[in-house]
Every structure is written in C-alpha cells, then in structure tokens.
Amino acid sequence: MPTGSSIQLVRLFGIRIGVSASWFVVLFVFIFVLSGVFRDALGGSETQAYLVAVAAALLFFVSLILHELGHALVAQRAGIEITGIDLWFFGGVAKMSRDTRSPGEELRISAAGPLVTLAVVAVCLGIGTLLDGRTFLDAAVLERRATPDPALMLLAWLATINALLFVFNLIPAFPLDGGRIARAIIWKLTGEKAKATRWAGRAGQGFSYLMAGYGLYLMLTGSVGNGLWLAVLALFLGQAARGAVAQSDIDERLEGVTVGDVMDPHPYTLPADVTVLEAAERVFAPNGWPWVPVVERDGRYAGVLHREAVDRALAEGRPALPVRDLAREEGWRWRIGVDEPLEALLGTEGLRQLGAVFAVDAQGVLRGVVTVDQVRRALTPAR
C-alpha cells in the first residue's frame, strides 16, 4: 500500500485522486514496453506506436481509477469515509477510514471494483465488435499486424488488459478483491470476522508463494523483467496477507471491547465560543500542546483546534475569532462513536495523523478521548 504523500490529480465525486512517485516509473515503463508491442501489431511508424502507447497507458490507469471508484462509492453509501484514491507502483487503492462491519457490506464493496472493470471490458468489446468484430478479436490477442487501425487496436488492448485484471482480481486470496469476497462469504457462513480474515489471509500467503515461485522460474528461463516484477508483487501480496492474519488474531482477542472501555472519560476541552487570543493564552502558550478538543456549551463535539491554526489566525489579525470557526474545518475526521468496537478505532485517520480520536455519543456529545498510548495499553494484554 502506498505510504507518504501523493500528488493530487483531480477530484471526482468529491474524492481526491492522487498518484505516488512510483506511479511515474510505472507509466514510463508501460509506455516503453507498449511502444514495441503496438509497433509490431500496427506495422506503422515509431511515432504512431508511441502515441498509441501513451494513450493506452493513460486509459489503463483511468480504468484503474474507475475500478477504485467502484469500491469507494459503494463504501461511501455504507457510511465509510473515503480519504482518497491513490495510484502507485502496483495499481490503485481506495483509502477507507474504517473496515467493514458486516459480511454484506464487505461483499458489496469488494465486488464493486471488479464489476466496474467488467463493465469497461463490455464497453470496449461492444464498440470494437460494432466497428469490426473479426479484426477486433485478432487485435485483442495482439496478433502481429492484426489491424492498421490505431483506435481499434487501442480498444482491443484495453479490453484485454482489463479482462486479465478482472480474472486476476477475483483470485480468492487476500488482499485481492477475490480474497475479500471470500472473506465476506466465510464471515457470513461462520459468523466470525476474525476467522474469515485469517482464512483469506492464509490463502493470500499461499498464492504469494506460488507467484514468487513462478517469478523465479521466469527469471531463470530468461524473462528477467517479468519474473522480477512478479516476485516483487508476490512480496507485497504476501506482506499484506500476513498483516491480515496478524490483525485477525488481535481482532479475535479484542472482541467485545469498545471505544468507551479504553477512552479517557475526562479530557481537557475548550468552549467553542472562546476567542483565538484566549485559546493562545490559556492553552497553547502555557502548555505547549499541539491541539485541544473544542465543545459547545451543551457538550457537543465541535472539532479540534490546532496550534498552527491559532498562530495563523493571530498573524492575520483575527484574535477575536471564536475557536469553533477554526475547529470545524477538520473536526469531523477525528471522531468515533463511543460504542464502536475497538477494532474500528485501530484504522482511523485520527490515530495515524493526530495521535488521538474523540469518542462521541449518539447526540454528538463528547464523552472521551482515546490516544495512541491508551490503545497500546489496551493491546498489551492481547499480545
């Protein structure tokens, strides 16, 4: 999974689409390899082959974005926040704020991506068949001199690569979509999410060993580039699968533990109508804290006030600004229900970026705060 920051390309349906630095390496390699493939298939000039290769690479990554959007939009309908979609070395990933909470939710989100990919294949196949069915099929298997028509070749290649992606993704091995679908089915049959995750993760580990072995075979038989790529991909899949197995052990031991069981029920808070100047003098100057939770007079959670936001407001000459106006910007990202299971807390963005998550009840009243240290203490007996 990609780590660190990414470069934003666009926003679709309110979802940030970004690319990591590794994506540019893959884009270059794709264009380089496809230029030779299309030169042989089209029988045209180097320039024509290069332009078709550029279009093919970009359209392929567009199809990956559509695949991840399928996951993301269904997840949003289930109430899961999507913090973004990133393209990276091995494809794309939709970053969800929490894991699924039911087998049906898991199945719908997992199946959405492959269904979008299948729709891309169907659209390409339909258009290609209408244009020239026989030639389109020859081009789809990249037969040498299959067609002199660049547009038909482009459609055929896009259909083929997405069909392969569809089949590969449905292999029942975690973290592939097929592995997640298998997890949903096992979860439904057994009623135990941890057990389902463990089985899917072990299947993913087994598949990664097979892929690594095949990659080694390719390298030994002369196809070093393809073999090395498969071996690295197998390493990534194996690590993700091992992580899922380890997580399932923790989830099983923490079953029944809620956010309310581990939170500090008496966090320091700042009233929402306090001015920026008062916040600086009362909280940040004497204590040096990086942030403080903000609440309304009735106890409702209003957000998080950051030291940087206070310093910026003072520098801009706004000392009388109520802190609620600064806390609203990102506050909703750091909260969680007090009755949520502890495992739902582990993957939240608040713990990763802020180091804390704020527990609220059904009326939005702040009931406590959970920090990284408190989570560590809660997990220590489980280990």
Image (cartoon, rainbow, N blue to C red):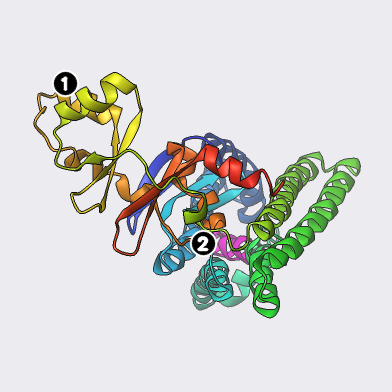
Mark 2: secondary structure: helix
| Whether residue 31 is visible | no
- Look at 59% across and 63% down and name the residue there: 256
Res 2 → quadrant: top right
For the N terminus, which image quadrant? top right
Q: Which stretch is magenta?
A: 148-164
Main secondary structure along the magenta-highlighted residues: helix
Q: Position of residue 376 (x, y in %)?
A: 59, 41
Residue assigned mark 2: 67
112 up-or-down from 232: above or below = below
Identity, as a three-letter code, of the amino acid under mark 1: Ala
Q: Position of residue 107 (x, y in %)?
A: 58, 73
Q: Amino acid at mark 2?
A: His
> In the image, residue 194 lies at what x, y percent?
68, 63
Q: Is residue 108 magenta?
A: no
Any mark on residue 146, and which?
A: none
Residue underneath mark 1: 315
Local crowd size for mark 1, using a 10 Å CA cut-off: few (<14), some (14–19), many (≥20): few
